[in-house]
Amino acid sequence: MATAELAGKHLVLGMTGGIACYKIAELTRLLTKAGATVQVVMTEAATQFITPVTMQALSGRPVYTSQWDARVPNNMAHIDLSREADAIVIAPASTDFLAKLAHGMADDLLSTLCVARDCPLLVVPAMNRQMWQNPATQRNVTQLRADGIEVLGPDSGPQACGEVGDGRMLEAAATYEAIASFFSPKILSGRRVLLTAGPTFEPLDPVRGITNRSSGKMGFALARAAQQAGAEVHLIAGPVALETPWGVFRQDVQTAQQMHDAVMHSVADADIFIGVAAVADWRVDHASEHKIKKTAERTLPTFTFVENPDILASVARLPHPPFAVGFAAESGDLEVHGEEKRARKNVPLLIGNLGPLTFGLDDNEVILFEAGGATKLPRADKQTLARALIVEIARRLPDPSLIR
Ligand code: CTP
């Protein structure tokens, strides 16, 4: 998990009553681990679901529940607690609290803090699906958005009451991602990014196939960084065991041909294409429909290969290509092969992995190849590197009015 976006941030974490309070213990841990300071403020109802003692232990700061708390020297908790805050996050935000916020009510410490704030306010709703769908709640949420309040979620799925639908709070990790995303500079705002990531899988028969060691981590880290930079992100992924980054549209494929077709179907809408996938160069011509069996004579199977389409080169060949970025994994002589590959694929930017064995690892070191020369970026974890690469890509984009 990335930490840079939230390091040094001061957040007031306001908890209102709801069973989702249990998720806030984990959220607090994630936020403090990322280097944020977290000042927890709880409504009376929230203390019925989780104790202030738990929240104090996790946040490392005293928890406030009352407007009349004598620990605040000037007795103005409603002003003092948010004075240094970079944001107030209300999680979980109950139906009642959303209604209070929409109407500017201030009858307890947390609601008064929100009305008296001078910083952004983010709310993470959590409620039963009927409460969420209620026209009054929907009216209130529309009003909150119109007032410039960020509404994160809600999620859809099974609820504590046993029903299924919209209204449940985002999981702690997704809430963390949404908060981190809020703080990232929006350098790709209004841009649409199409990415490929992971390996492909080329079947030999219904149970066997050829794949490679790509984990998809770099592609997923880039998708996440692009989303956080304000882009609309479409991620086309081969078979990987990774969670979809928050706010990213993901499409799963297996083979290089499927990945090619999916890219070609969506590329017309993209401003930027980043080919991070380790695409198989060849596939077996006519994969067997049935499992290939051993024969009595022990004859070994033979396969004929045909070439897969080159997705990156196909994108670059379009009459009006998006800004196309390639990746290259080489087992040697990157400096020589990198620029040669960039020129061959006819892309403005190609990112070369320094060191052959970065598959599956969390760290990476890369060189940027472009017409003007090569630039090395410092070794970093893949998420930090992804953020740096998004900055490099954004810097090289043509003026939006000239891009297509
Ligand atoms: N790529 C692609 N479609 C392919 C092969 C590669 O889109 N069929 C893309 C990769 O996603 C990557 C770039 O091309 O962005 C370079 O991939 P790489 O495997 O390093 O290059 P190849 O063209 O396959 O060259 P070689 O295997 O000979 O090094």
Image (cartoon, grey):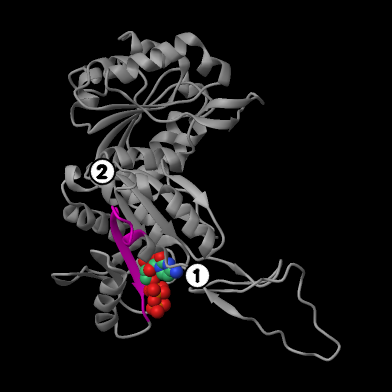
Rendered image quadrant of residue 69:
top left
Q: Could you tell which of marks 1 and 2 lies nearer the N-terminus? A: 2
Pick the front one: 302 or 169: 302
Let me know if residue 327 is in the magenta part.
yes
Q: Where is mark 1, residue-wise?
A: 308
Q: CA distance from mark 1 to mark 2?
A: 38 Å
Would you call the spot at circle 1 few (<14 residues within 10 Å), some (14-19), or many (20 or more)?
Answer: some
Q: Is residue 149 magenta?
A: no
Mark 1 lies within 8 Å of ligand 1 (Cβ measured): yes
**CB of mark 2 near ligand 1 (< 8 Å):** no
Residue at the disc numbered 2: 184
Q: Amino acid at mark 1?
A: Asn
Q: Is residue 245 left or right of residue 187?
A: right
Whether residue 146 appears in this view of the structure is: yes
The image shows residue 26 at horizontal and vertical percentages of 46, 41
Taking the spot 38% from the left edge, 43% from the top edge, the residue there is: 177
Q: Secondary structure at mark 2?
A: loop
Which of discs 1 and 2 lies nearer the camera? The answer is: 1
Tell me if I can see residue 358 in this picture: no
Above or below, 195 relative to 127: below
- Looking at this view, is 235 or 100 the one in front? 235
Q: Residue at x 19, y 23 (%)?
A: 118
Query: Is residue 373 shown left or right of residue 186?
Result: left
Residue at image location 31% in from the left, 70% down from the top = 345
Q: Quadrant of ligand 1?
A: bottom left
Give the extent of the magenta segment: 315-330
Identify which amino acid the numbered label 2 is placed on. Ser
- Which of 193 and 31 lies nearest the eye of the viewer? 193
Toward which corner of the image does residue 54 lie, by quadrant? Answer: top left
Q: Residues within 10 Å of mark 2 (few under 14, many from 20)?
A: some
Marker disc for residue 118: none
